Amino acid sequence: MNFSSDTAAPAHPAILEAMVNAAHGPARSYGADPWTAAAREALCKTFETDLDVWFTSSGTAANALALSILCPPHGAILCHEEAHIERDERGAPEFFTGGARLSLLPGAHARIDLSALTRRLAANDPSFIHETPVHVLSLSNLTECGAAYRPFEIKERAELAHEAGLAVHLDGARLANALVSTGASPAEMTWRAGVDVLSFGATKNGAVGCEAIILFGAARQRFHELKVRAKRAGHMPPKMRFLAAQMSAYLKDNLWLDLARRANTSAAGLAAALTRSGAELAHPVDGNEVFAMLPPGVAPRLSAAGAGFYPWPSGSHRFVCSWATEQSEIDAFAATLAG
Amino acid sequence: MNFSSDTAAPAHPAILEAMVNAAHGPARSYGADPWTAAAREALCKTFETDLDVWFTSSGTAANALALSILCPPHGAILCHEEAHIERDERGAPEFFTGGARLSLLPGAHARIDLSALTRRLAANDPSFIHETPVHVLSLSNLTECGAAYRPFEIKERAELAHEAGLAVHLDGARLANALVSTGASPAEMTWRAGVDVLSFGATKNGAVGCEAIILFGAARQRFHELKVRAKRAGHMPPKMRFLAAQMSAYLKDNLWLDLARRANTSAAGLAAALTRSGAELAHPVDGNEVFAMLPPGVAPRLSAAGAGFYPWPSGSHRFVCSWATEQSEIDAFAATLAG
Amino acid sequence: MNFSSDTAAPAHPAILEAMVNAAHGPARSYGADPWTAAAREALCKTFETDLDVWFTSSGTAANALALSILCPPHGAILCHEEAHIERDERGAPEFFTGGARLSLLPGAHARIDLSALTRRLAANDPSFIHETPVHVLSLSNLTECGAAYRPFEIKERAELAHEAGLAVHLDGARLANALVSTGASPAEMTWRAGVDVLSFGATKNGAVGCEAIILFGAARQRFHELKVRAKRAGHMPPKMRFLAAQMSAYLKDNLWLDLARRANTSAAGLAAALTRSGAELAHPVDGNEVFAMLPPGVAPRLSAAGAGFYPWPSGSHRFVCSWATEQSEIDAFAATLAG
Amino acid sequence: MNFSSDTAAPAHPAILEAMVNAAHGPARSYGADPWTAAAREALCKTFETDLDVWFTSSGTAANALALSILCPPHGAILCHEEAHIERDERGAPEFFTGGARLSLLPGAHARIDLSALTRRLAANDPSFIHETPVHVLSLSNLTECGAAYRPFEIKERAELAHEAGLAVHLDGARLANALVSTGASPAEMTWRAGVDVLSFGATKNGAVGCEAIILFGAARQRFHELKVRAKRAGHMPPKMRFLAAQMSAYLKDNLWLDLARRANTSAAGLAAALTRSGAELAHPVDGNEVFAMLPPGVAPRLSAAGAGFYPWPSGSHRFVCSWATEQSEIDAFAATLAG
């Protein structure tokens, strides 16, 4: 009954097997190897477009590197006030950009409110030297509250941003979960909706440690700078093949979507059990995360039964399922709630 | 005949097997797992002392993070003018420290010259505000020229540094190779010789991607800050167990020393073949790297025969062996030279 | 009728005269001159305590340098959401600290709300690595809305901050105006109320360009670092005597308080005229700034009559008086309003 | 007999008078005032071209801001190993650029050696990600050894730099002295010789504190960024008119060249006295600085007689004259030497 985090799960056997298989013979370092080329090809096919990609072992690094090629040190990044880059990355965006600032927006379920975004962009004046203008809009899908944006919701926000001269970044640490629940294709949810740079996560969904920074369209002109910044930040692993092999295995035969579907199904079961027990869901369950307001006494009872989960700042509790969550865990959880 | 780099080698099977074995059941994220605790224990035993350790997947990150807890943004770091942190890390020390400076010293075979060090330290005046004072001495063992410092050589440099109020960092990306060739113990070469913080590499010697930042003695007071800086730089992998498992396997039953011995032996064979052919060694071969001045026509002949190696700025050529280098490669290389 | 800013005013003749008088004979550079020593003495007397001081020609630099010795790059600074350091300094705090973050608090009239501060401090956990903890509380007096904190209000906020382990910075760009309106002494409003580091402004109140960064008590241990950071940022003027001479003249015979009283009186007259005309004051007029909600048509009429002032984000308009504001300007303004 | 520094001199009366005259009536802040416009016009006339300019009160800031718009954080700046930006600015270039690096070149009399420059540029490879490529060549005229480059010497270095894709910065803290001794015009020594950005100093030659960052030609496209960076660094003084007034007075009726000529003449007299006494000049005396190898016993004798000067790292001693140096000081100095 470990619902503490999807990173508490181990790695999927197929991904480890791919790493083992990559350990044959010499290969050029730093990404100039056939595994990396193959992973890039697989991503092009998955996203139905040509693209540039850089692999890192950390989602924080993926986000911060992506932002650092889109925002100068004297600019700002628009994000939701509960975004991971604001709450959980210890100032990585500020570090990687050389001192840019996060500018926070409200919105239910950690989706950026459209009218708040509109007002903020209307007030933006890059020619006014005294204030810090915004250069990037950073969205997250799933959001930090486990809700999904549908493609048109990404698109309406991205269009506003582009009209105002901003670039659009998407933190897709749990993109697979959002795609499964919305039924959208990778392309529809990203570049077709206006995303310029994507942090595409695999670690929370079965990888050992693999995140891809994907550049679409005009953003691809920043690829050399991205590599330079990655090198400088210690995110240019010499044996890149072991990251690339993870990504290829992740995408192969839709493993990634299968794993996300599994996690989402577990979360739905967990949410149902919570609702039955009288708990109230704090946010829509659009992926593998459940946020619930627990009746008094329930949290201690769950803990006593061995369940792992976290209290959340809002007063709710967070329960996260992963591809490795077993039905028996859901059942035991439900039984504890019922009992 | 791939002598381009030790990072061109794959990962050792025992290390991959350890990763596979770590993929069982849930575990706490970010290093609070039993594999990480076990790897720390193994390091304590190896280095015969209590210590603090943080794992990264990048040697550049290990060096830069280590330096960032020892040097303020307005200070400088003493290193050899051919050091990896100066030549090959794209300004990572400057980035991680927030703008500190490298101050370069000469010395044969990329060993820092003792009298140059003495003079530089004598001229250092931290109370003088206009100049940038040095705060750290960074040594590399093996050096960038493949030479080894013996423990007393580390010690005499570290003592000078400590007397002048500096901390001592050791870039040990190839520490195993230096230990094998000098016969020194890990403790003798590091904290007993005055090293405060060690970048302890495994990637070049068989790991998938694993480097340890090790804090000895008083430097351990900086451990919390090290973790904070690692987090902020995207070097706090959620599934840390897969890094830790590599390190444990690396140390187990002296695998690391066996692999380094194998690489050193290959390099000795390669050096002998080169010498026989009329090439002159540019530097002592104290590890797995050979730098040679090739007679005219030799480099193209080797390339034509399929050998991988790099020309070096000094006019020599660099040949690197690894644990995976086969005797047949050395033989073929020698035959090409002879033929 | 120029009410656009107190920095639109020229410099006071006594201050310019002091600069002219300082231009005699050679003097040691960078602050080791007798004028600088005398200015420090004058500040010690004014603030009734021993202190360390550094002069800069910019309020932005004074604030950012002050914050940079109190907050590490991986920390955060608490301030009001309308603070000058947030709104008007183009990310200078982020730049000088190397990437620290501003964490914003609400509060009427740009005074930090006490309960919001209490809650924020209760949630602060420096041992939790993933989030950015706060290290400094930065207050402004006058606030950005022209309101004053009284000494006990500074004190209750500073005590909360100190209990939580934070340092306290006071942006006193308009401290003179706050002292005049509250009747508090310089000591009561600063170190006796718990202020560790003060940005003490003279530029808005008659100087050519002179701000003092003043360290009280334990913060004085950071004086060497402050000088280093000032040097590195180009804020160590070689002919420091010309800054110091300004400060001495500013303090002499209470010139500074006389000038502030003059500006405050002008603002009171301006506020009275506005109120009489049906405008509503948006904030208390505790100094030399008036924020008013203007009835329709009034702003264009004032502009047409040649009045200088700015619309403010909140919907109000800002009118600033200075020591150089003439009674005739207030009269003309009132007449325009009445007419 | 104060020969310690040209910044030990006071400010010239005409410059102070201009500041006093600027203190009349309100003016727009931050450079949007008529004094600033007039100073820009005077600079255009002096340099015989249209240009953009920003004023700062610090030469360190002028240099570092100039470099920060020419070099990314992951690039390097070529300069002489004795350049002021390397030796005397406490890492300001690193700070303002966000971590760029200085790459040092040798050369007699602190002039960059042409063949060393050629070799360094030939080795530069911006497409190679691991090393830090150079983006800027920074020259100083006068050099740190008091020698002057003639225009053709600037030009041959600038052409090499431009061919290699670098921008060219000139640290002209003592440009007036170099122009006087070489007879070159401001235009010949700067933009006509290939200088893109000039730090044009007045402080060492009679100003209170005034340096101009001047953008020529294509570099003018960076003017908005320069202002943003200046603001962010606390180098956008609200009462800019008092900087601009200094510059206008400095240029008016060739005051600046007259003052430099006076200082150069004093230095020539001082050098002659030294040579007569048996001292050997270490560098050409092309401006207001004299570096001499003193016979044993001379330095203490001069000090005992009240002369101010500094020992220099090379073993020589530095003597600096200024516009304020009196003939009587030279005479007394010569008498002490002779006696």
Image (cartoon, coloured by chain):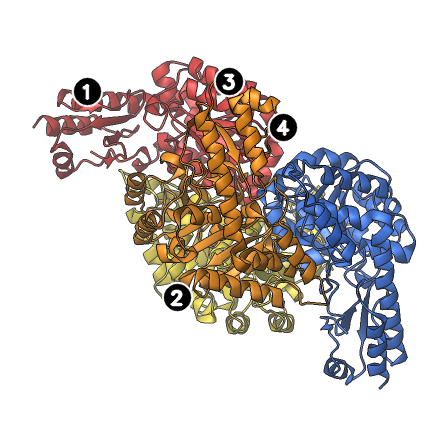
Chain colours: A yellow, B red, C blue, D orange
What's the amino acid at mark 4? Answer: Gln
Between disc 3 and disc 4, the foreground one is: 3
Tell me if D274 is positioned left or right of C246 in this view.
Answer: left
Circles 1 and 3 on the same subunit: yes
Judging depth in this view, the residue of D187 and D158 nearest the camera is D187
Say which chain tag 4 marks: B
Q: Position of residue A333 (x, y in %)?
A: 65, 50
Q: Which residue is mark 3?
A: B160
Q: Is residue B200 visible?
A: no
Question: How many angstroms separate mark 4 from mark 2 (CA)?
Answer: 47 Å
N-terminal of the pair, mark 4 or mark 1, is: 4
Q: Which mark is residue B272?
A: 1
What's the amino acid at mark 2? Answer: Gly
Circles 4 and 1 on the same subunit: yes
Judging depth in this view, the residue of B248 and A280 nearest the camera is B248
Q: Which residue is mark 2?
A: A217
Q: Position of residue C167 (x, y in %)?
A: 75, 42
Circles 3 and 4 on the same subunit: yes
Disc 2 crowd, CA 10 A, few/some/many (<14, 14-19, 20+):
some
Question: How many angstroms separate mark 4 from mark 1 (CA)?
Answer: 47 Å
Q: Is residue B223 visible?
A: yes
What's the amino acid at mark 3? Answer: Leu
Say which chain tag 2 marks: A
What's the amino acid at mark 1? Answer: Ala
Q: Position of residue C257 (x, y in %)?
A: 86, 54
Q: Secondary structure at mark 1?
A: helix
Whether label 4 touches label 1, CB < 8 Å: no
